[in-house]
Amino acid sequence: MSLFLSAATYVTVGCYALAMAIALWRMLWGPSAQDRVLALDFVYVNGMLVILVLGIRYASQMYFEAALLIALFGFVSSAAMAKFLLRGEAIE
Amino acid sequence: MNTVPLWIEVAVAALLLTSGMLSLAAALGLARLKTFFQRMHPPALASTCGAWCVTLGSVVYFSVLEGRLTVYALVVNVLVALTAPVTTTLLARAALFRKRQAGEDVPPALSKGID
């Protein structure tokens, strides 16, 4: 890993962290409940991308499984919360 | 393990930085747009273009590093492409339902029982 690509991965992770901070602001001060769910889903996607970039940085294939799990948990939690907003219960 | 040539590293870094900028643009859209139905659009930027750039960079980097074709980072894209539309549809229906309950000006339901 050269210094160039290493610096590029750190800048990319910094961009993701900034995006997550902005989405966190929307999640805390969002006017409605569906705004908060949308922001949480966005934070999950960004977390998955951070794990993938760290996998490139440390040249390890082990990170893909973690990224897949984060994507899966993000989908399940967002779908459950959207279903809760729609019906008042998550499992009918 | 091979050494990675410089032009491959430049390509991977360009893909990663593009993904970071797209994600940042999506977050700014999420913060600045006015209504909820407008705000539903920007996160798709991160989960389509952003994820594709990162996984393509990962595929290129690991293929060169190991000297063989390693494409299983693309599984992440398949998973995101399957799940993101489901979440978006459910959220849109929930938002329509809640705005209708609150008496806001949204299109009426097509039939009883279907939102």
Image (cartoon, rainbow, N blue to C red):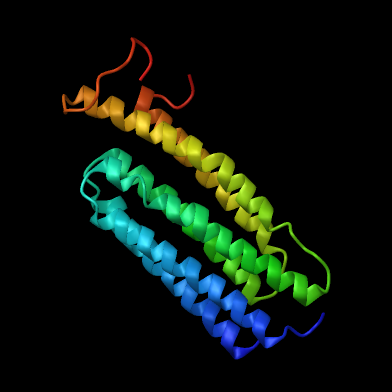
Rendered-image quadrant of the C terminus of chain B: top left
Residue B96's place in the image compared with A55, above or below, is above
How far from the left and from the top, in percent, is residue A92? 48, 19
Residue at horizontal 23 percent and vertical 24 percent from the top: B100
**Residue A88 visible in the shown view:** no
Residue at horizontal 34 percent and vertical 11 percent from the top: B111
Name the outermost residue toward the top: B112
How far from the left and from the top, in percent, is residue B7? 65, 84
Residue at horizontal 28 percent and vertical 45 percent from the top: B38
Determine whether, in the image, residue A79 is placed left or right of residue B42: right
Determine whether, in the image, residue B18 is placed left or right of residue A24: right
How far from the left and from the top, in percent, is residue A4? 57, 87
Rendered-image quadrant of the N terminus of chain B: bottom right
Q: Nearer the viewer, residue A87 or A7?
A: A7
How far from the left and from the top, in percent, is residue A7? 53, 84
Q: Which image quadrant for residue B5?
A: bottom right
Q: Nearer the viewer, residue A60 or B50?
A: B50
Determine whether, in the image, residue A66 is placed left or right of residue B109: right
Q: Which image quadrant for residue B6?
A: bottom right
Residue at horizontal 36 percent and vertical 26 percent from the top: A86
Name the outermost residue toward the bottom: A3
